[in-house]
Image (spheres, rainbow, N blue to C red):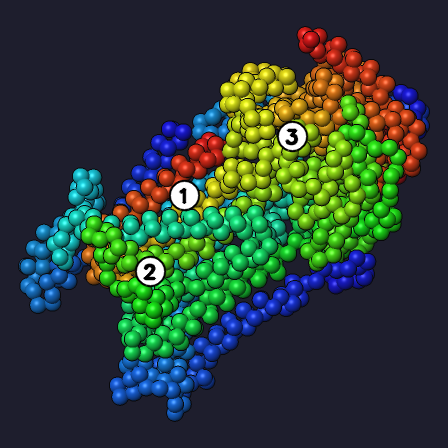
């Protein structure tokens, strides 16, 4: 098990390295004249050149990348071209908002999906059809459209929750809860739709396996077979989907944070990508990849723990 | 293929087009898509107004005067913007899907068919791309490539290409090992031809379905980008319209309705179409042919009979009838009026060919028929108590210590997530209430009884770490763990090699003798019957045709079907004579 | 051999006087297929795992019109021999000669030409036919691969169906509309399409019910009698091999342990493994089975209590 985790972690680090190099090179291509962009069309060429050399843009890309990499390894992601803000600090300030959103959505999704999926898969019949309809509807509607409808209904019409704004958890739990409820709800619709379908179909598949009949033939109760054996085997594909949903939330958060005016990573991404602030974009991409790798590692560990065969492959 | 010359005797299955047209969900969602696409493509015919002409005095103006849906915040015609905006939204989705297909399908074909380094490389790349959130990558590429929707849609196409790649690669790699592909290679078909004939047929349906899903996703993502205001600012799109409407949501909430409706209807229609296509294209037809025969014989069976002979004390089955409900609502009898008796300490063989209903009979005794199946008539007495219609709770009490089960396929009957030890101790603890230590001690003893060397090591193994013969011994140990009176063994040696079979048969015989168990042995192998059984019942198409003592039945069969089975046995068929060169002109 | 009555076909396949060449040794000149010292290995599981030897120096010969039965248990490598002859697995060592010409490592082009002479029938009639191709298309496949015009192929397909006793309208149907035995007839018809001289039969009757198994065996014997095709007949079932084969080779762990005339190998085998195989399979006669069981336990369980 330990060597399995180490192998996965090593391949994650390799991935991080490859993506960082790739992104750095790609992002450097169109930024030949950042100094001009920063200083405006009326600045003198000397000033522009000086600025470019300040930013290190007169160096070859490979040198710049190695520079960036060595500082990044020390936790320094550089400073924004436009605001001079420290990138690592800026991300650290905003990460808790997005992470709390993502964790909230994942908890809601995991709970709701397992309840719905097991219910549909074991009971079949009407319960099954209801979950399937939910799945199609949740999948069919673009996420931000769902978000808009939720805003219109719960914030604009019913006024149960604020339409916009954020209260940090450290200030007030109630305030935090009221500001994140609608964003979490919005993001959960599609996630629950996707994951509950997966849970349902794996439960149905596992229920049909030979060993389930054999276990029941030993005199074990149906509920014991379902919760001990079926769920454990059905959880593997469901966890994989849940992991992918979690990563997808980083994208979903972009829209949801924008709509609800939350000061998270998503809103930051929109803000800096439109300006082409390369150090910040690099930092955001790296943070995303780290989140992806950590999540995948967690999923792998969970799956390996649940399913001994996965460890060897 | 050639035109039909001879009329098929069996009813032909309805064609794909026919099945599509009779599926309301498919027709309806396609119709919605066609209407939307038609309106968007022929926008100039549907409105004379410009999508960009803006008259500030008309801002938020109501419908009227040829302006079907009124005006937006900048005084532009909403209907015209909806139609022309659709061109950009749908066009972008088409572009993304096209790019995804062009990149994903050929790469998937190549990787799946040839494997090797290209497969490893492509799969690694795909895992990498799939791990990244599309929205973040799109935003980052926008910073690099500039704010053109079309360029972003190409990027999106590349981002979703992995879903086609995985689909195609999986299907192709799965069929690469299939004998029919090997056969095609033996016939000398070129790779390109094998791909065209065999591979594309297999991936066609899933790819079409995926196209609909990906199109829906592309529309959603693209609209999302536009909504954020980071698409091509000036062009009208549904996402941009939603954005403008959202900023004025308090003043004119209706403005959100139209683009939202267009977007929702298009994506919903695409996803519904995909799920309908799945039903239509992946139709795998009706069940096996054997069922139809069974139904015919069912019609001949008589109504419920009463007291047929004395009933055995251990297991007594009378007039057992098992029916399955089919998809079309009709039901089909697979077992029709079966009578069986197993006395204490007796081994009864239940013999028949595949589809004869012997396994269904065994499952009915256990009360474990698969979903859709039910005992529609008859009685099953286990130790004198009625099992047909008994509660699940009552049956659970019987299973394990009154009646136990040994399955056919050893590997698929062990839960891969648990160790051999878990499999053995769990029933001991729940059924017999043993402590953890007691259960472990008993499990080790059981493994010794089924002649497993090094029981402690096997206890800690997972099912995939032991051999098939070993797994079957574990299953037998599990079956006898709670001292059952009756053992139901369903083809217990069929999946095993013949030398392993001999060992397992010897084990079953010894355990049966030691414990005095009754055994209902389901098999198709008359040699196994001769080896193990006291009496035999021969089953055909859901009906028992003959019962008798093993020696009598095998040497002097009464029923013509039993004779037919015995004649097919090759035990005494003479060996073929040695080869001789063919005489010239022997043809 | 006690004389219980059995269906006539199998008997008819025997020459009337029951004589013939009795010597197991086949000369090189006689051989249609000559496999010498064949070695096949597969990559081991996991990184840098050693290769697994599947065949460890196998030699066998088949004469025109002859059936060589190849019997062994799962994992013995028996199917791999057939697959190597067909060019479906790479050969690590040794030679395969067909009709005097080396065919191991043949190019794809050469393979195509060779496929006119060497064909295959696989075990599982459910997977050896593409489920989404009509029977007619499946049967026409080898013909089209050999460049036979479509019109001509259609006529041949109808003939083929006649030869394996299937209705001609089968061409318009899908494999799933047929039973296992019928599908295996389709697979046999496909192998016959271009009149091969050797057919590799990889467990062709193992997935079939007892009575169906018998009719498919009869069909194969009948075809051999009429066309003079040779069979490499791979099976795990000694009794099937005995009826089908002129000579029998027994394989274990990638090595042939015994070869000889069918009657000798399946009645009085020399090698202990063959004896064990023979005694392991129970016979459908309680009294004789009891004797065999006793003998089995005496021979192989002397140490067991």
Q: Which residue is mark 2?
A: A182
Front one among A59 and A114: A114
User: Which residue is pictured at 68% across the width and 9% down the height?
Assistant: C304
Question: Residue C232 or A39: which is nearer the viewer?
Answer: A39
Q: Position of residue C103 (x, y in %)?
A: 64, 33
Q: Can you tell which quarter of the image residue A31 is in? A: bottom left
Residue C284 higher or lower than B377, as above or below:
above
Q: Secondary structure at mark 1?
A: helix
Q: Nearer the viewer, mark 1 or mark 3?
A: 3
- From the top left corner, tell me how far across and down residue B423 is, in percent: 56, 28
Q: Are marks 2 and 1 on the same chain?
A: no
Q: Estimate the spatial distance between the alpha carbons at disc 2 and disc 1, rounded to whole Å.
A: 37 Å
What is the crowding at mark 1: few (fewer than 14 residues within 10 Å), some, or many (at least 20)? Answer: few
The chain identifier of the residue carrying mark 2 reads A
Instruction: Please provide percent x and percent y for residue B495.
Output: 68, 30
Residue at mark 1 = B124
Q: What residue is drawn where x is 76% and y is 51%? A: B332
State the image quarter where residue B569 is shown.
top right
Q: Which mark is residue B400?
A: 3
């Amino acid at each position: 098990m330990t060597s399995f985790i180490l192998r996965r972690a090593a391949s994650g680090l390799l991935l991080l390295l490859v993506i960082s190099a790739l992104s750095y090179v790609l992002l450097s291509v169109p930024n030949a004249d950042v100094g001009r962009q920063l200083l405006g069309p009326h600045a003198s060429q000397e000033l522009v050149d000086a600025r470019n050399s300040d930013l290190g843009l007169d160096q070859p890309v490979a040198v710049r990348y190695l520079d960036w990499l060595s500082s990044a390894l020390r936790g320094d992601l550089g400073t924004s071209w436009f605001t001079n803000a420290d990138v690592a600090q800026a991300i650290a300030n905003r990460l808790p908002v997005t992470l709390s959103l993502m964790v909230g959505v994942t908890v809601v999704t995991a709970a709701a999906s397992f309840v719905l999926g097991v219910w549909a898969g074991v009971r079949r019949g009407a319960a099954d059809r209801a979950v399937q309809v939910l799945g199609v509807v949740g999948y069919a509607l673009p996420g931000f459209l769902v978000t808009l409808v939720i805003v219109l209904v719960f914030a604009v019409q019913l006024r149960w929750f604020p339409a916009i704004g954020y209260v940090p958890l450290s200030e007030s739990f109630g305030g935090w809860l009221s500001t994140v409820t609608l964003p979490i709800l919005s993001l959960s619709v599609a996630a629950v739709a996707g994951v509950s379908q997966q849970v349902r179909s794996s439960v149905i598949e596992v229920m049909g396996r030979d060993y389930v009949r054999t276990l029941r033939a030993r005199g074990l109760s149906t509920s014991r077979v379902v919760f001990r054996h079926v769920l454990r085997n059905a959880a593997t594909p469901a966890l994989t989907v849940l992991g992918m949903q979690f990563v997808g939330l980083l994208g979903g958060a972009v829209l949801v944070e924008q709509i609800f005016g939350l000061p998270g990573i998503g809103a930051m991404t929109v803000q800096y990508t439109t300006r082409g602030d390369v150090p910040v974009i690099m930092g955001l991409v790296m943070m995303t990849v780290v989140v992806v790798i950590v999540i995948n590692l967690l999923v792998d560990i969970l799956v390996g723990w649940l399913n001994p065969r996965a460890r060897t492959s | 293929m050639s035109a039909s010359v001879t009329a098929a005797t069996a009813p032909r299955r309805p064609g794909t087009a026919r099945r599509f047209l009779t599926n309301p969900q498919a027709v309806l969602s396609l119709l919605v898509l066609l209407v939307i696409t038609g309106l968007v493509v022929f926008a100039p015919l549907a409105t004379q107004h410009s999508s960009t002409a803006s008259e500030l005095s008309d801002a938020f103006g109501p419908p009227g005067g040829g302006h079907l849906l009124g005006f937006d915040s900048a005084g532009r015609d909403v209907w015209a913007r909806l139609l022309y905006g659709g061109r950009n939204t749908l066009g972008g989705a088409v572009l993304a899907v096209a790019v995804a297909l062009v990149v994903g399908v050929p790469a998937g074909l190549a990787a799946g068919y040839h494997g090797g380094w290209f497969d490893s490389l492509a799969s690694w790349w795909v895992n990498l791309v799939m791990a990244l959130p599309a929205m973040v990558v799109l935003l980052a590429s926008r910073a690099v490539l500039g704010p053109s929707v079309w360029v972003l849609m190409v990027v999106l196409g590349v981002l979703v290409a992995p879903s086609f790649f995985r689909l195609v690669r999986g299907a192709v790699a799965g069929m690469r090992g299939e004998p029919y592909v090997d056969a095609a290679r033996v016939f000398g078909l070129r790779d390109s031809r094998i791909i065209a004939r065999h591979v594309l047929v297999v991936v066609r349906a899933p790819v079409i379905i995926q196209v609909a899903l990906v199109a829906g996703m592309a529309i959603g993502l693209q609209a999302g980008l536009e909504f954020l205001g980071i698409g091509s600012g000036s062009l009208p799109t549904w996402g941009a319209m939603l954005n403008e409407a959202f900023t004025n949501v308090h003043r004119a909430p209706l403005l959100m309705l139209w683009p939202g409706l267009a977007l929702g209807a298009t994506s919903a229609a695409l996803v519904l179409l995909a799920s309908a296509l799945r039903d239509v294209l992946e139709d795998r037809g009706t069940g096996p042919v054997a069922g139809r025969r069974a139904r015919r014989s069912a019609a001949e069976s008589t109504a419920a009979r009463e007291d047929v002979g004395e009933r055995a004390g251990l297991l007594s089955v009378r007039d057992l009838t098992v029916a399955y409900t089919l998809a079309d609502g009709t039901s089909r009898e697979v077992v029709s009026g079966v009578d069986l008796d197993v006395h204490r300490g007796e081994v009864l063989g239940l013999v028949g060919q595949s589809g004869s209903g012997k396994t269904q009979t065994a499952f009915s005794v256990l009360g474990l028929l698969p979903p859709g199946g039910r005992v529609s008539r008859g009685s099953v007495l286990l130790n004198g108590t009625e099992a047909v219609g008994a509660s699940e709770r009552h049956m659970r009490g019987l299973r394990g210590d009154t009646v136990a089960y040994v399955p056919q396929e050893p590997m698929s009957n062990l839960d891969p997530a648990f160790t051999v030890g878990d499999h053995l101790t769990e029933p001991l603890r729940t059924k017999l209430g043993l402590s953890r230590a007691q259960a472990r001690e008993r499990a080790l003893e059981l493994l010794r009884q089924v002649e497993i060397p090094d029981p402690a090591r096997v206890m800690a193994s997972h099912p995939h770490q032991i051999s098939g013969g070993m797994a079957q011994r574990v299953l037998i140990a599990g079956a006898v763990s709670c001292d059952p009176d009756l053992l139901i063994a369903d083809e217990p040696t069929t999946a095993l090699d013949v030398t392993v079979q001999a060992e397992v048969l010897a084990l079953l015989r010894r355990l049966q003798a030691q414990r005095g168990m009754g055994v209902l042995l389901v098999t198709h192998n008359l040699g196994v019957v001769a080896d193990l059984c006291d009496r035999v019942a021969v089953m055909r198409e859901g009906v028992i045709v003959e019962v008798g003592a093993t020696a009598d039945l095998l040497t002097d069969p009464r029923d013509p079907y039993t004779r037919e089975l015995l004649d097919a046995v090759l035990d005494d068929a003479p060996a073929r004579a040695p080869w001789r060169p063919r005489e010239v002109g022997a043809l | 051999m006690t004389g219980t009555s059995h269906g006539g076909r199998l008997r008819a396949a025997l020459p009337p006087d029951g004589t013939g060449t009795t010597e197991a040794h086949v000369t090189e000149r006689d051989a249609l297929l000559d496999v010498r010292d064949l070695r096949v290995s597969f990559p081991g599981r996991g990184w840098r795992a050693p290769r697994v030897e599947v065949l460890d120096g196998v030699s066998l010969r088949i004469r025109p019109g002859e059936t060589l039965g190849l019997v062994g248990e799962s994992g013995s490598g028996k199917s791999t021999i057939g697959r190597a002859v067909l060019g479906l697995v790479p050969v690590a060592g040794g030679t395969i000669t067909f009709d005097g010409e080396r065919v191991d490592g043949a190019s794809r082009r050469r393979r195509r030409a060779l496929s006119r002479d060497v064909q295959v029938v696989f075990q599982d009639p459910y997977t050896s036919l593409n489920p989404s191709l009509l029977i007619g298309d499946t049967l026409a496949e080898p013909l089209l691969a050999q460049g036979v015009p479509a019109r001509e192929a259609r006529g041949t397909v109808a003939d083929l169906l006649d030869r394996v006793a299937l209705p001609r309208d089968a061409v318009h149907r899908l494999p799933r509309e047929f039973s296992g035995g019928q599908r295996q007839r389709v697979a046999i018809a496909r192998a016959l399409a271009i009149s091969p001289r050797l057919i590799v039969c990889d467990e062709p009757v193992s997935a079939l019910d007892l009575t169906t198994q018998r009719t498919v065996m009869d069909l194969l014997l009948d075809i051999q009698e009429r066309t003079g095709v040779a069979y490499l007949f791979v099976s795990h079932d000694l009794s099937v091999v005995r009826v089908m084969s002129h000579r029998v080779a027994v394989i274990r762990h990638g090595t042939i342990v015994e070869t000889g005339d069918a009657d000798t190998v399946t009645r009085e085998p020399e090698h202990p493994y063959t004896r064990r195989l023979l005694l392991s399979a129970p016979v459908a006669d309680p009294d004789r089975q009891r004797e065999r069981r006793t003998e089995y336990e005496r021979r192989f369980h002397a140490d067991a209590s």
